[in-house]
Amino acid sequence: MSVLELTNEMTTSFSNINLDENEVEENEVEENESMFYIDNDLDTNHQYFVAKVHLNFYQIWSMFMILPCVYNSGKCKYEWKLKHTKSDVVISIYDWNNKNRLLDTKVWYIGCSVNDKKVIGEFLGVLCQAIECYNFYYKKSIETKTFKSEIEKVNEALQDIKNSLIENKQKLIQM
């Protein structure tokens, strides 16, 4: 599963799950295309501060499953860069004045290349839905390191997350 496809899986595929009964409803769900994708090669400037968020490593990793940009100097140490699919807007999630390793970083900042309230709103909406999905479907299984679920789509995503953690284990330990 590609980088932000997981976030889209979390935010769109589960939109037809009835949380009370934990069963998938038979309603048709429109195909949703990605609104953002990660491109850590983009040039970013945090011209506009958007928000400060508290996310643990597993929450961020389950959304992106890719290593961040790592900077050896400056106030920003780690950064993920996301491009809006329908414009040139770049949003980044980054740390600031952080002395912790990546695995221990819990405070993140969201910056944007322009002050576009529509795109920022779309991004914050996707981020909030991804966090809700993580907390409801993935948190317990990931944090207890079982990486298993009774729900097939969730189980597949958990296996992808687990595999990406294993593939990047050595790099993550060093960061």
Image (spheres, rainbow, N blue to C red):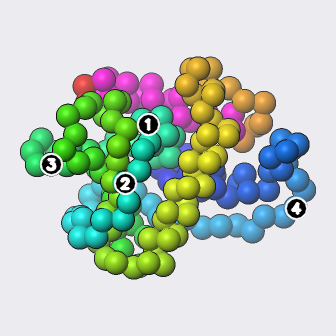
In the rendered image, the vertical position of residue 115 relative to residue 145, given as above or below = below
Residue 37 percent across, percent down from the top left: 44, 60
Up-down: is 159 above or below 76?
above
Q: Main secondary structure of the magenta part?
A: helix
Residue at image mark 1: 56
- Disc number placed over residue 165 in the picture, else none: none
* Span colored in magenta: 154-173
Amino acid on which disc 4 is placed: Asn
Q: Is residue 24 left or right of residue 59?
A: right
* Badge 2 element: strand
Where on the picture, by quarter, is residue 156? top right
Q: Residue at x 65, y 67 (%)?
A: 32
Name the N-terminal-most of marks 3 and 1: 1
Mark 1 falls on what kind of element?
A: loop
Q: Amino acid at mark 3?
A: Lys
- Location of residue 25 in the rendering, given as x and y in whole percent from the top left corner: 88, 53
**Residue most toward the left?**
73
Q: Amino acid at mark 1?
A: Asn
How many neighbours does mark 3 have within 10 angstroms: few (below 14), some (14-19), or many (20 or more)? few
Residue corresponding to mark 4: 27
Q: Quadrant of the C terminus?
A: top left
Task: Look at the image and say whether residue 159 sits in the magenta stretch.
Answer: yes
Observer able to see residue 68: yes
Q: In which quadrant of the rendered view does residue 72 lie?
A: top left
